[in-house]
Image (cartoon, helix red, strand yellow):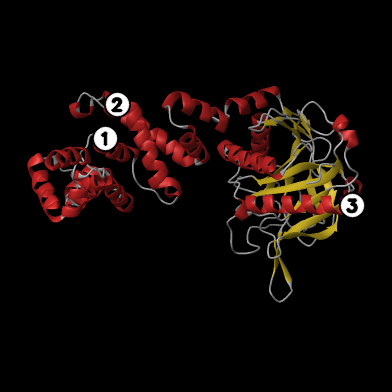
Amino acid sequence: MNKEYRTIIGLEVHAQLNTKTKLFCSSKNDSRETMPNTNICGVCMGHPGVLPTLNKEAVDKIVRSGLSLECKISKFSKFDRKNYFYPDLPKGYQISQYDEPFCLGGIFKLSSGKIINITRIHLEEDAGKLIHDKGGESLVDYNRAGAPLIELVTEPDFSNADEVIEFAKELQLLWRYLGISGANMELGEFRVEPNISISINNKNLIDNNGNIEKKELPNYKVELKNLNSFKVVKDALRYEIERQTKALESGEKMKQETRSWDEKNKKTISQREKEGESDYRYFPEPDLPPIVLTDEYIAKIKISMPELPKEREKRFMEEYGLPLSDILYLIINKELGEYFEKVVSELRSWERSTERPEVIDIHMPRLIKLAANYLITEIGNKICLGFNISAENFAELVVLTHQGKITSTGAQKVLSEMIKTGNDPSNIIKDHNLEQVSDKGELDNIIKEIIKNNKKPVNDYKFGKQSALQFLLGQVMAKSHGKANPKIAEEMLKKELQ
């Protein structure tokens, strides 16, 4: 980018709350519903004479969100009508919040140490969904209309696409840990909408945090909508930054507009001129009273807060001593991390057991690392797909591998069978004859046969080619169907080749 210009990005992030019912009615709130226009009623469709009733569960969840980001929780809040006419808005207005939202302020620290300031988090109802068919017609599915949304608005503190992606991914993870949203982008449960503008890079207008002062912001911004993945968000931002920079360099006057991403042509396209606040004609929602939150209520929500990702990351580092890459994987994959802790708990129970003398000498750090390795490399996302291995059985497999009862190759076979059947590893090892061979008499016969049938690698090894030993060891493992103890087999091979 030309050094004369500076990128300024603010975000609006929406998340559909995972409440049982919609925000102001008893219709089912289900983002996975495939049959159009089934989860609807007179309230969310805006029929005459109906009255909205606020869903308390949605209020609980937005307060949770605000507390996790150090927001000030407003004790007095109200809803407003945001007026605009669009086919997916059945009432012709949206019940949202304007000047008295539930959460104000808040901060988020990026990995670089840069602070992203949060302006507000407010609660509102979602619109329906437009479906465009190949014949050029558009249909409307109102299942989503009235679903509870939280909208988080940041200050224009981002300078590039990488900062935006880091923030969005961490926010998605945070909301999942809080249990307030599935936050799946492909289901429309999590939507990232950047606002981008370009400014002349005057260092005198930058505050101590590296952000441009508000009074010096450009007089336009371009909002990007309908971005359905993090990759699309990054691609659209990079394209738009380049487009706006080139336009300004050529003297073009920028306009305030909403644009969407054209995946086929890899560019943003204009949808419409962007409305200003005055265009929405906000006024207090007459059918809903203001909401007053007590100190006791806020304290109760605060006490119920779960362990958050950063807190869990710190605890995992202190408690398990794993590499940071392993810890981050277990943090990002929340269910896998929770299962890992159950496995470790079982391992510790086995270590303390006096009824199992053969496992008293277990070395816990090695066991924990072995458990993490198998979970990360062999299980991963399977944990979310009907995974039926008990933590006790998984811990037993780790112990048996650590004790040398089975080889690593054998352990993979056992694990594969456990995933299919859910059976315990001891029975699988017995039924499939997978127990590791450490008997020197049995191994001696195999090794002598391998040496006899592989004269070239034998000679290569004797002339100093170390890789030949690994080839011969591989032949021993293959002949034993992966059951030979590799450490003992290697020692015997070296002795036999002397």
Majority SS type along the magenta span: loop
User: Which numbered marker is on residue 363?
Assistant: 2
Q: Residue 471, how many percent across, how many down?
A: 24, 49
Q: Which span is picked out in magenta?
A: 248-255
Q: Secondary structure at mark 1?
A: helix
Q: Are circles 2 and 3 on residues that touch, CB within 8 Å?
A: no
Please indicate whether residue 70 sits to the left or right of residue 417 in the image: right
Reading the image, the residue beneath label 1 is: 402
Give the camera-side residue of 494 and 344.
494
Tell me the amino acid under the disc marked 2.
His
Specify which label sits upstream in the sequence, 1 or 3: 3
Specify which label sits upstream in the sequence, 2 or 3: 3
User: Which numbered marker is on residue 459?
Assistant: none
CA–CA distance in space, label 2 to label 3: 65 Å
* Residue 274 is at least partly visible in this image: no
Q: Quadrant of the C terminus?
A: top left
Reading the image, the residue beneath label 3 is: 254
* Residue 160 is at least partly visible in this image: yes
Q: Residue furthest front?
A: 463
Q: Residue at x 58, y 46 (%)?
A: 182
CA–CA distance in space, label 1 to label 2: 9 Å
Question: Quarter of the image holding residue 209?
Answer: top right
Give the camera-side residue of 141 and 68.
68
Q: Residues within 10 Å of mark 3 (few under 14, many from 20)?
A: some
User: Is 260 situated above or below 468?
Assistant: below
Q: Residues within 10 Å of mark 1 (few under 14, many from 20)?
A: some
Please indicate whether residue 19 sits to the left or right of residue 283 in the image: left
Give the camera-side residue of 439 and 416.
439
Q: Residue 204, how many percent across, how many down?
A: 88, 30
Tell me the amino acid under the disc marked 3.
Met
